[in-house]
Image (cartoon, rainbow, N blue to C red):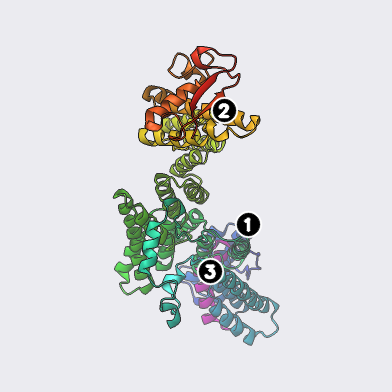
């Protein structure tokens, strides 16, 4: 940033060259040094100008010399040293006008706005009509107004999301009425027992919807504040550590933790012992997933300031959040899945805007729902995890598994491709993509598991039970009094059920089917299938009879004559023409 060039106090008189100088001679030599410094200043060679002004001050101190050096220091962004020179100039000459102009600028750039106002007011008391001093004074008022607006915008948003741990550092007192258990909160043992008896599919998980990201409106407010901060840092308060802290806070509130960490690191290079910057860097580290490093930063502050209340609270908070996550992990490892869900859910409430940390929690909870076959809940949690941390590969894997359960195989392939792009060299991710494509291919064939109404990991007993249930549901006897179209539909369903069972009851055929072999390639030459690949309907009756049902709907007398129609794979290996079967009708 270029500073306004200012007119130097020039005097071209030359001092006499004598070994023993008088005060007048020293003054003349100092004036010559100042004149040389002015030339360097005009040429924008501020470093040499500062050296010459320093020699002039050492030779014969004058307010003008300090003032000129202050101007060169300002151009070099050395506002602290420049301020010292302005104060020295005023001490030598209280009526040195330029010192008030430059000193006000230095105080302002350093962010010492109250001191800047006071210094400018002193100058105005001496020079009431001075436009330059008045301009500096008015500028301070404008900056203060901007700071008030920035603080208002950031405070409103930060408190809403506890972005800077306001809910922990400055907790609101809880009204007595809120502490008293409500009717909903009172434990009802009878109701608990009723809940235990509920079917798992109907279980209601207490999964509160949490605000992890800023709303668009709140993000816009923070962006406006950051824009104002950047403008002030670029023009008016470039050396203000307090202003830089506000900038770091704004980045944390915006959830730009990488940016906040970078800014805090830069500020600490020149302010190593600043506890506020160190604390903010600790928060940025914690939110960026570096918990151990964040805790070390807080310990560093506490070693120098053991009574720092806010830092002590943050230290305990960071530790407790870590322990809460571990409690969930412990319950998960011991297969206490419901307890793990409770623990992870509680942990999510502790620091809602901690995106990377909470992404892991949601992914962990998704893993639990996968084990419980709660596909939609697993998908929802994995999706939130991916949204919070788009580079979190494990969350993609869990969402892919949930998509299998939801039978959304195209999306599963898309997720597998996204994950592989994050780490193209990973063999595991390559295999994940291959598997997703296999699952997509398998989804386009007959789903024998769905036909029998069982899960893909169903046991032999569950498969047999599913077959009997579905076969009885679509047993042709039930549709004997229906129209021809309904009878035909029931026959097709019945044959399809038999076909599914014939494959899944045989371990080798089931293994091949699960591996992705097309059903058409499983049928040829296998028991129960005709020459054309279709299932022999009489074989289905044999299967039902072998389960103790005698192939009939009950033990009542009477028979029903049933024609299988002209579908391929008929009884006796003939793949054409109608087939006649006789069986008991209940």
Q: Position of residue 341 (x, y in %)?
A: 39, 55
| The disc label shown at residue 492, or none | 2
Q: Residue furthest front?
A: 557
User: Which badge, 2 or 3, is on the more N-terminal residue?
Assistant: 3
The quadrant in which the N terminus is found is: bottom right
- Asked whether 62 or 165 is in front, the reply is 165
Q: Residue at x 51, y 46 (%)?
A: 390
Q: Position of residue 334 (x, y in %)?
A: 29, 50
- Residues shaded magenta: 73-94
Q: Position of residue 27 (x, y in %)?
A: 54, 73
362 shown above or below 35: above
Q: Is residue 548 visible?
A: yes
| The disc label shown at residue 579, or none | none
Q: Secondary structure at mark 2?
A: helix
Q: Is residue 156 left or right of residue 513?
A: right
Label 1 sits on residue: 43
Can you tell which of label 1 and label 3 is closer to the viewer? 3
- Asked whether 316 or 189 is in front, the reply is 189
């Amino acid at each position: 940033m270029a500073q306004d060039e200012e007119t130097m106090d020039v005097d071209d008189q030359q001092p006499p060259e004598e070994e023993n100088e008088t005060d007048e001679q020293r003054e003349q030599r100092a004036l010559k040094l100042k004149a040389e410094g002015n030339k360097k200043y005009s040429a924008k060679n501020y470093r040499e100008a500062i050296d010459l002004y320093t020699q002039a001050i050492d030779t014969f101190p004058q307010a003008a010399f300090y003032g000129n050096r202050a101007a060169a220091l300002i151009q070099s962004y050395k506002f602290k040293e420049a301020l010292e020179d302005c104060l020295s100039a005023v001490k030598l000459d209280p009526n040195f006008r330029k010192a008030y102009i430059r000193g006000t600028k230095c105080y302002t750039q350093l962010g010492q706005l109250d001191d800047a106002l006071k210094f400018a007011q002193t100058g105005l008391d001496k020079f009431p009509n001075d436009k330059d001093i008045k301009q500096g004074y008015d500028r301070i008022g404008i900056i203060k107004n901007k700071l008030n607006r920035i603080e208002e915008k950031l405070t409103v948003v930060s408190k809403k999301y506890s972005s800077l741990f306001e809910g922990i550092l400055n907790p609101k007192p809880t009204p007595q009425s809120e502490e008293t258990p409500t009717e909903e909160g009172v434990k009802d043992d009878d109701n608990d027992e009723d809940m235990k008896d509920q079917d798992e599919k109907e279980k209601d998980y207490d999964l509160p919807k949490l605000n992890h990201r800023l709303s668009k409106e709140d993000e816009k407010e923070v962006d406006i504040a950051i824009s104002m901060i950047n403008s002030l840092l670029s023009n008016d308060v470039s050396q203000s550590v307090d202003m830089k802290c506000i900038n770091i806070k704004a980045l944390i509130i915006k959830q730009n933790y990488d940016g906040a960490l970078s800014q805090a690191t830069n500020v600490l290079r020149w302010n190593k012992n600043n506890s506020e910057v160190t604390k903010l860097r600790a928060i940025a580290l914690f939110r960026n997933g570096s918990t151990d490093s964040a805790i070390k930063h807080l310990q560093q502050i506490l070693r120098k300031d053991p009574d720092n209340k806010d830092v002590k609270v943050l230290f305990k908070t960071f530790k407790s959040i870590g322990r809460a996550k571990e409690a969930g992990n412990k319950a998960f490892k011991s297969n206490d899945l419901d307890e793990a869900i409770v623990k992870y859910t509680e942990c999510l409430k502790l620091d809602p805007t901690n995106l990377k940390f909470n992404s892991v929690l949601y992914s962990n909870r998704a893993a639990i729902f996968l084990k419980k076959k709660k596909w939609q809940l697993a998908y929802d949690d994995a999706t939130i995890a991916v949204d919070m941390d788009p580079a979190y590969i494990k969350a993609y894997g869990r969402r892919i598994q949930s998509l299998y359960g939801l039978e959304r195989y195209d999306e599963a392939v898309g997720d597998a491709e996204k994950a592989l792009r994050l780490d193209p060299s990973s063999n595991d991710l390559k295999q994940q993509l291959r598997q997703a494509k296999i699952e997509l291919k398998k989804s386009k064939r007959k789903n024998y598991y769905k036909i029998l109404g069982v899960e893909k990991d169903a046991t032999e007993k569950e498969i047999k039970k599913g077959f009997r249930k579905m076969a009885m549901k679509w047993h042709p006897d039930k549709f004997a009094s229906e129209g021809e179209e309904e009878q035909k539909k029931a026959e097709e369903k019945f044959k399809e059920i038999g076909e599914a069972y014939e494959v899944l009851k045989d371990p080798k055929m089931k293994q091949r089917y699960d591996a992705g072999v097309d059903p058409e390639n499983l049928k040829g030459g296998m028991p129960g299938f005709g020459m054309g690949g279709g299932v022999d309907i009489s074989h289905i009756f044999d299967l039902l009879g072998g389960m103790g049902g005698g192939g009939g709907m009950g033990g009542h007398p009477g028979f029903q004559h049933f024609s299988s129609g002209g579908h391929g794979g008929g009884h006796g290996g003939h793949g054409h023409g109608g087939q006649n079967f006789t069986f008991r009708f209940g």
